[in-house]
Amino acid sequence: MTAKQLIQTEIDQIPEDQLDELYQLIKNFTAQKNNLKLKRRTPSKKIAGKGKTLGDIISPIIDEEDWQCLK
């Protein structure tokens, strides 16, 4: 039985008053989700300038011969 079929079977067995509550709960959740504004996170100013670049995208920080995963 698929998850969708299992959910449908459970919904079919719910009493009518509980089904109305479930519908209202889903409706409210959907409305809240649509109105939710996600804020973009920014790093703290306390850590500004304290980062250190150890390597770059062009070349790795250590030689390929030292890579344990390639052996």
Image (spheres, rainbow, N blue to C red):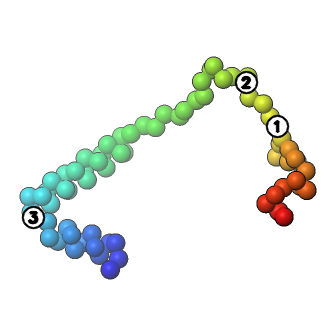
Identity, as a three-letter code, of the amino acid under mark 3: Pro
In the image, what residue occupies the spot 29% across and 75% down? 5
Q: Position of residue 4 (x, y in %)?
A: 32, 72
For discs 3 and 1, the disc positioned in front in the rendered view: 1
In the image, what residue occupies the spot 88% across and 53% down? 66
Which corner quadrant of the image does residue 36 belong to? top left
The reply, left or right, for residue 50 in relation to residue 38 is right
Visible in this render: residue 12?
yes
Q: Which is more N-terminal, label 3 or label 2?
A: 3
Q: Where, quadrant-wise, is the C terminus in this rendering?
A: bottom right
Above/below status of 42 relative to 59:
above
Which residue is tagged 3? 15
For discs 2 and 3, the disc positioned in front in the rendered view: 2
Above/below status of 9 relative to 29:
below
Q: Where is residue 52 in the image (x, y as percent from the top left)?
A: 78, 30
Which residue is tagged 2? 50
The reply, left or right, for residue 49 in relation to residue 36 is right
Q: Is mark 3 on a helix, strand or loop?
A: loop
Q: Where is residue 12 in the image (x, y as percent from the top left)?
A: 17, 71
Q: Where, quadrant-wise, is the N terminus in this rendering?
A: bottom left
Depth check: give the residue in front, 18 or 24. 18
In the image, what residue occupies the spot 82% across and 37% down? 54
Above/below status of 16 relative to 49:
below
Visible in this render: residue 58?
no
Q: Position of residue 45 (x, y in %)?
A: 62, 20
Q: Do the residues labelled 3 and 1 touch (CB within 8 Å)?
A: no
Depth check: give the residue in front, 61 or 67. 67
How far apart are labels 3 and 1 at the CA level?
62 Å
Which residue is tagged 1? 54
Identity, as a three-letter code, of the amino acid under mark 2: Lys
How far apart are labels 1 and 2 at the CA level?
13 Å
